[in-house]
Image (spheres, helix red, strand yellow):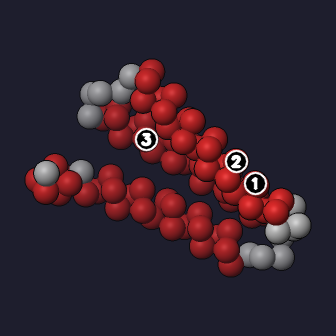
Amino acid sequence: MLARVYKHSGYYISLIAILSLGFLLAYTNNSSRSFQIGVVIATTFFYVLWGMIHHLLNHDLSMKIVVEYILIGVFGLTIIFFLLNVNGNY
């Protein structure tokens, strides 16, 4: 298990960097709601793209995996948009 995690550590570090950068950009710019929404959409896009590239390079990309990443991305977007709407800032 640890050998597999170590083997893919570059992928995981890049994923953490993508998600952290997206969070920091959206969190630090509270004045522009449209910028925050754009950052969330861009972060989701790069998350889905990262997943497809990761699986393509490891030769296990399938339609099921593509749909899974897209659905997780849409689910995340839905949660963020719901939270923005509940706060009354949307």
What numbered label is drawn on residue 51?
3
Residue in the image at 60% along x and 73% along y: 24
Q: Amino acid at mark 3?
A: Gly
Q: Position of residue 53 (x, y in %)?
A: 40, 38
Badge 1 marks a residue whose secondary structure is helix
Residue in the image at 83% along x and 76% along y: 31
Say whether marks 1 and 2 touch (CB < 8 Å). Answer: yes
Per the image, the residue denoted by label 2 is 78
Badge 3 marks a residue whose secondary structure is helix
Q: Is 86 or 50 nearer to us in this picture?
A: 86
User: As displayed, is residue 72 above or below residue 32?
Assistant: above
| Residue 22 visible in rendering | yes
How far apart are the two marked residues, 1 and 3, measured between alpha carbons? 22 Å
Q: Position of residue 63 (x, y in %)?
A: 45, 21
How far apart are the two marked residues, 2 and 3, measured between alpha carbons? 19 Å
Q: Amino acid at mark 1?
A: Phe
- Which comes before the other along the chain, label 2 or label 3? 3
Seen in the image, is 77 located left or right of residue 37? left
Residue in the image at 62% along x and 44% along y: 75
Q: Position of residue 79 (x, y in %)?
A: 67, 53
Question: Crowding near pointer 2: few (<14 within 10 Å), some, many (20+)?
Answer: few
What numbered label is drawn on residue 71?
none
Seen in the image, is 76 located left or right of residue 81? left
Q: Residue furthest front?
A: 86
Per the image, the residue denoted by label 1 is 81
